[in-house]
Amino acid sequence: MTIKRIKAASKADVDLVNSIAPPVRGAHAGSGIHVDIPADWAARIASGEDVPGCTYAKPQADGSLLIDDLVQAELVKPGREAIWAKVVDIAAAAQQLPAVDEQVRAK
Amino acid sequence: MLNIGITIPGRVSGLGGFNGNFASLFPTAYQVVQSDRGLTYGGTMLPTAGNTSTATMALSGTLATRPVPIWIVLDVSGTIADIYYDGLGVTPAMSGVSVLGGIPIALTGAASGLTITPSAGTLVSNNSWKATCSALADQSGNGFHYTQATAASQPVVTLGLNGKPGLQFTEGRGTFLTSACTLPAPGTTPWMICAVFTMVANSSFGRIFTDGNFMGLIANNGTTSVLQYGPNGLQASAAITLGTPVAVDTQFSNSASDFLKVGASAPVTCGPAGSAASAGRMIGGNLAFATVDLYALIYVPVSGYTAAWRAAVANYYGGAVSV
């Protein structure tokens, strides 16, 4: 499996990835307090809401979206050139660290 | 005089009422999470390195008992699998299971209640998938749950210690969990991090417990050690042994009396690390990622700290943790 990123993913990009690899509900285990996964979890994710415990396409803090082999194989198909042009490998994205981290990197 | 010990199932006597939930020892904690309580498996299992199948494995259901690592490993035919809960891939819990797209596989034994459902797509011989964690609930009652929606960034559930699972965060995959936990500026309200984890491998300033950047504990660069990192930069480091589970206490008060205690080693004086409020907390990273196995993490005001928790850790994990 090779994980890549869609740079600066738009809402349309996120929706497309979620249509290729539909969101799934997580599975609770063990005792104690658990996160609340609402019955309408799928609809909430589709409307752009964050639903803890589920697995779905969600942009990272830097606005990029991680995609696996399955999604990459669909995005490379004809008609999706625009989104595929925004796909980079993780190493390329990781080089763009915020300036606030320079103190640590320079140590 | 005759001493008669009475053991109440589910409780550890003589440890301040510890009942297996670290929140019971830290009633004023901001946040308490532990990998054996309130875990939610990710809905999509993680394809392991080298996996070239296009089929995915969905994990669903509810497990009433303690979480276990779950692996599904195809044999050479690509249509038959063994399923493991040992976290090692040595002793299968289920053998010779048929794997067909869209046909659910009901798990038995320690994972009874859960189901693996393969999707349509190719299944390649000897490929495997592992169960991950998409959420870890805050046991403090404050609702600061950790979550990760992206399958590729979810930590893997591991065998752990003394029957309690762990969560494996990996620098190479960039795994992390986030929560909305707010912490005060420590110069105003001092607080502590109390944690049980194993540093599996060193990583260059990999964030272990931070606000996404600083105000927390990170791995050092080069030497195998951990250190406080805050607005004032890197503080004195404390050595840590790779592969050895440790209990860690570290105090943030933005003063030179702060400390970092790793396992049984003497506390290292460090600080002042600076004072900044946290509007969210992360495990595992952002910017730089850590490779650790996590078992427990507590954020607590200094006024609510109890050293008794280290004895509870020693007992709960069967002596496997250096305290």
Image (cartoon, rainbow, N blue to C red):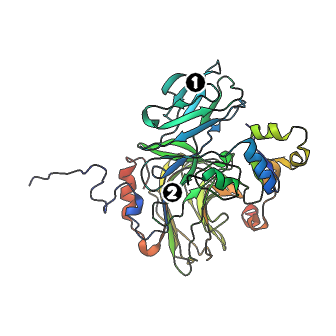
Residue B37: x and y, percent? 45, 52
Circle count: 2
Res B323 quadrant in image: bottom left
Residue at 65%, 21% (x, y): give it. Answer: B78
Residue B204: x and y, percent? 69, 54
- Chain-order first, disc 2 or disc 1: 1
Is any part of residue B218 visible from this angle? Answer: yes
Residue at 77%, 58% (x, y): give it. Answer: A63
Please, is residue B235 above or below residue B57 in the view?
A: below
Which disc, if any, is residue B81? 1
What is the crowding at mark 2: few (fewer than 14 residues within 10 Å), some, or many (at least 20)?
many
Please, is residue B285 above or below residue B77 in the view?
A: below
Please, is residue B170 above or below residue B80 in the view?
A: below
Is any part of residue B217 visible from this angle? Answer: no
Q: Is residue B288 left or right of residue B292?
A: right
Residue B16: x and y, percent? 31, 63
Q: Identify the residue position indicated by label 2 in the image.
A: B137
